[in-house]
Image: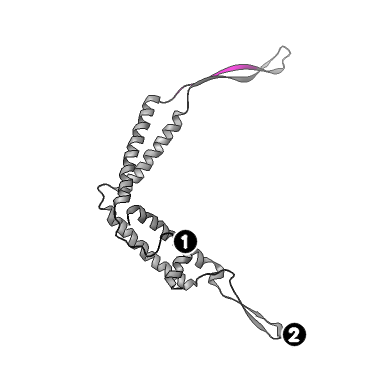
Amino acid sequence: MNLKESFRYQSFIDNLMNSAAYSIQAREHSLKIVKTHNRNAANPEAENITEDVVCPDIFYPNDEVIDFMKFLVIEKERLSTAIGNAKKSIDFDLDAAIETNQQRQRMASAIKTMLRYTPSNKTEIGKDYKFNAEGNQTAYFYNVDVSTTEAFNRAESKATMKSIIAEADEISTKIDSAMINTVVNYTPPYDVNDSFDDVMAEYTGK
């Protein structure tokens, strides 16, 4: 598999682990409930009955799921080690390139939003108070001229945005190429499209 597929498989293993953890944490999967109906104490002619309360959903026993979880931990380590070794064959730091490119894209997006703000002039109505001839306080209204100007260098900011986008696109191409062409020495035990039930059935041989 290549790096792109290996990252997807890492997520697949994580999802399997989440499903397994959810299964063993379910109270109805963790405890057996037995109800003893002491009917004879109230009715000498009746027999006592022991009832095993069956969980309504179908699930794998916790011991089997825990064993599977141990297997997943080993597989995650194997895959992560294989990915680490594969990354060493790349002529640049893939993780650093991905993280840095995310910052470039964030920066370009922020500048793009900033460039949407444009200067304008408008008039608002202001309100104040004064005393009239009778000594009473009265309100009066007046015009407020509001002028907005750019608090940044538009030409320079636009040029920076274009440069950052071009650089991000170039690095993205390198990243995509590495993700597709870098081989990861790992054989997946299950199909990445299998469900938790599919994998558990295969693992337990059921």
Residue 2 % position (x, y): 32, 54
Magenta stretch: helix, strand or loop mostly:
strand
Q: Are marks 1 and 2 in contact (CB under 8 Å)?
A: no
Q: Secondary structure at mark 1?
A: helix
What residue is at 72 percent from the left and 17 percent from the top?
136
| Type of the residue with mark 2 | Asn
- Magenta includes 143? yes
- Lower sequence index among marks 1 and 2: 1
Residue range corresponding to the magenta coloring = 141-150
Estimate the spatial distance between the alpha carbons at disc 1 and disc 2, rounded to whole Å. 49 Å
Residue 46 % position (x, y): 72, 86
Looking at the image, is 38 positioned above or below residue 155? below
From the viewer's perspective, is 97 left or right of 143? Answer: left
Which residue was labeled with disc 2?
A: 43
Residue 79 % position (x, y): 34, 60
Residue 31 % position (x, y): 55, 73
| Type of the residue with mark 1 | Asn
From the viewer's perspective, is 204 left or right of 81? Answer: right
Q: Nearer the viewer, mark 1 or mark 2?
A: 1
What residue is at 64 percent from the left and 17 percent from the top?
141
Q: Nearer the viewer, residue 144 or 132?
A: 144
From the viewer's perspective, is 107 left or right of 117? Answer: left
- Magenta includes 201? no
Which residue was labeled with disc 1?
A: 18
Looking at the image, is 136 positioned above or below residue 104? above
Q: Secondary structure at mark 2?
A: loop
Q: Nearer the viewer, residue 123 or 68?
A: 68
Answer yes or no: is residue 137 visible.
Answer: yes
